[in-house]
Amino acid sequence: MKYKYKGALAMGALLALIAAVSTLTNPTASVKAQTGEVEKALMPPTFLDASPAVAGVDHVLSKTYINTCLPSCSAFAVGAGKAIPLDQLTTINCPAPVGKTCTITDDAWIQLENTSSTTNNPEALGFYVDGVDADFYYNGGGGTPGGPLYDAIAHKTAVAAKVSRGTHTVQTLTYSVDGANGSAWTATYRVYVP
């Protein structure tokens, strides 16, 4: 008898556990009534709808240049409609063999406070190589309209391909549609050779 009682108790505990798991994993009737039927998971997109894949090119990192205001960043104004530099011109070298070119990337970000009281205030970061815009687009908002906090980040990774062998300058600029205040920022340039 002693063993049958323990077996029955264990069986009862197992059935209670199964019932609890079943209840927790299945929505109740009230949940279904509030939200409709349980939604089915969407199928992942198929590659038939995607653009053609781009083949990767093997690169070797030659050098990295890091420009930043951290750890002591001062606030500064980003005037409406005016591009301002985050860093000084940085001289880099493309050490590609004769007849080859380099790829230069810019990983940049800036912390922002929106000074516009009415808009999300699009913000851009621009990557310039030898004074020419290599990649400039809107990539963040200026944060809460009229907000007193630095509550937004604009971030981008820009790529300049086929940069000729030799010495070049790079620089990151920022631009705000309606004006913002900037604070912390970093621009990291990487030079790759094939």
Image (cartoon, rainbow, N blue to C red):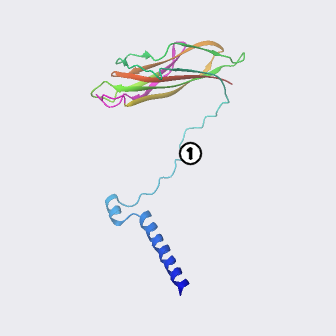
Q: Which residue is at the front of the view, 65 or 10?
A: 10
Can you identify the residue that label 1 sits on? Answer: 48
Q: Residue at x 46, y 66 (%)?
A: 21
* 16, above or below 132, in the image: below
Q: Residue at x 54, y 41 (%)?
A: 50
Q: In percent of the image, x 35 and y 22: which residue is there?
A: 180
Q: Position of residue 53 (x, y in %)?
A: 60, 37
Residue 105 is situated, as x and y percent measured from the top left of the image, at 57, 24
Position of residue 194 measured from the top left corner of the image (x, y, whole percent): 69, 25
- Residue farthest to the front? 2
Residue drawn where x is 27% and y is 27% of the image:
117
Which residue, as the protein is rendered here, is positioned at the far right?
98
Inspect the image, locate mark 1, and give the three-letter code of the amino acid beneath it: Leu
Which residue of the protein is positioned furthest toward the bottom in this rendering?
1
Residue segment shown in magenta: 126-150
Comparing 107 with 46, the one in front is 107
**Picture layout, residue 177 above or below residue 39:** above
Instruction: Specify whether 14 is left or right of 39.
Output: right
Q: Is residue 39 above or below residue 84?
A: below
Check if residue 145 falls in the magenta segment: yes
The magenta stretch spans residue 82:
no
Residue in the foreground of this view, choosing between 95 and 66 = 66
Q: Is residue 148 above or below residue 39?
A: above
Q: Secondary structure at mark 1?
A: loop
Q: Residues within 10 Å of mark 1 (few under 14, many from 20)?
A: few
Task: Name the foreground residue: 3 vs 157.
Answer: 3
Within the image, what quadrant is residue 106 found in?
top right
Residue 187: percent from left, percent from top:
51, 22
Q: Quadrant of residue 27?
A: bottom left
